[in-house]
Image: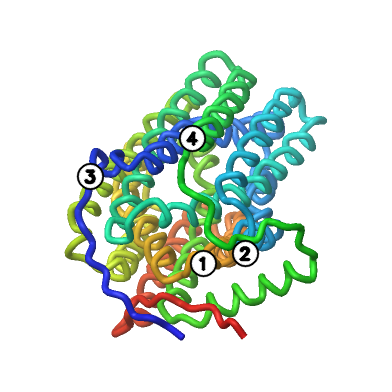
Amino acid sequence: MAEKIQIEEKAVGLKELLKIQDYRLLWFGQIISDMGDSMTNLALLLLANHLTGSTAALATMAILLALPSLTVGLFAGVIVDRADRKRVMIISDILRAIFVIGFILVDNQQKIWILYSIGFIQAAIATFFNPARGALIPNIVPKEVLLSANSISQTSRIIFGLIGTGLAGFMIGQFDLYWPLFIVDSLTFLVSALLILKIQHAQRPGLEIEPISFKRIFSELGKGLKLTFSNRILTGAIIAFAVTMLGLGAVNILLIPLLVDDLMVTETWFAAVEFSQTAGMILAGALVAALAARLKPTNILAAGLILLGIDVAFMSLSSNIWHIMIILFFAGLFVTPIQASGSTIIQIAVPDNVRGRTGSANNALITTAQLVSMGLAGVLADMLGARAVFVLGGALIALAGLAAILIFRGANITILQENKE
């Protein structure tokens, strides 16, 4: 059964949202760990490129970081729906704080396997944290301000990601040092865990906290997947994101070689490059919050994808760092609305008891497309040229937007109800 709901979005700023104590604690934990994550993510890719000089090594690192969403992530969503989400996030932060220190051991090409192994483990642990966080937000924020909350969260994620990227680029470019970045990242996970510990949101009534068998995990996963794809709006949002990542995966892999090897950009420029996209995302975040009362999340998602696709295609024409920065600025204008509206659609359409499974199903499909795209990145670049891949990627993203328009036309966001039989 599906229950139709009316959504009256309100334009809410950060100041108003931070008056909600639980959201404030979750948000502070997010921005601190986002800064650490961005430092480590850039450091891992640059370290892999530095030690091997191979695009294949970059692709391998990126694939291993994405693979857990397709494997571990599916089952993590079931556990998130059956466990205390606050506890899941705290344990995830503590484990990642421990494992990230292991990256310090990697100092030559022969130890690249350590980089790959710990990177995979870190990403696997994150598959528990991210669905738990996404499922918790609607419990602590009223649904009429969800779009604003998601937009602000996404904008702040990019701002503090910029700070982390800038620190990483400066440290590596000026001193050729990686290990301090991993230590700082470890500390950010611990701070995040302490903040989440203070969240007062009560455990959901009737929650089953008990050991569950693999048979039950597969059964619950099947129910979640069936429920996910029984709703037109939800299916459209997930498919749109999957097609988008089919286009963006290769683009993300080829961007670093384009900057470092083709345009001869030094690592110290990475902060400026990241800032150009961040500036667009900050501006877009403010616009989404202000227009939330006037625009449907489905319309924002579809339009944003079409414009992002066109923008990505223009990257094929870049001949210097300034072209890249302008293109990324406009990309930032579209990315924040896309992610905020997509998260809002999923959070509104899905009942609380299956949000973890739905989030995992979404991540799995998106990751599958991303892995296919990243795996083909090197092959397509050799066959067609890297710049042609940017055109192809942009076309796929725009196609996702057009498909979303057709799927969303005349449809209403509904809350799905799990079949109790």
Inter-mark Cα distance, 4 to 1: 35 Å
Residue nearest the viewer, comparing 219 with 273:
219
Q: Amino acid at mark 4?
A: Lys
**Earlier along the polypeptide chain: callout 4 or callout 2?**
4
Q: Amino acid at mark 1?
A: Ala
Residue at the front extreme, as displayed: 206
Residue 150 located left or right of residue 260: left
**Residue highlighted by disc 2:** 368
**Residue highlighted by disc 1:** 242
Q: Is residue 264 visible?
A: no
**Residue highlighted by disc 4:** 198
Residue at the top extreme, as displayed: 175
Element at badge 3?
loop
Q: Position of residue 199 (x, y in %)?
A: 47, 40
Inter-mark Cα distance, 2 to 1: 8 Å
Residue nearest the viewer, comparing 123 with 192:
192
Question: Which mark, residue 137?
Answer: none
**Residue highlighted by disc 3:** 13
**Earlier along the polypeptide chain: callout 2 or callout 3?**
3
Say few, some or many: other residues with alpha carbon within 10 Å of mark 3 (under 14 / 14 to 19 / 20 or more): some
Of circles 4 and 2, the one toward us is 4
Taking the spot 41% from the left edge, 28% from the top edge, the residue there is 163
Element at badge 4?
loop
**Earlier along the polypeptide chain: callout 3 or callout 4?**
3
Say few, some or many: other residues with alpha carbon within 10 Å of mark 2 (under 14 / 14 to 19 / 20 or more): some
Of circles 4 and 1, the one toward us is 4
**Earlier along the polypeptide chain: callout 1 or callout 3?**
3
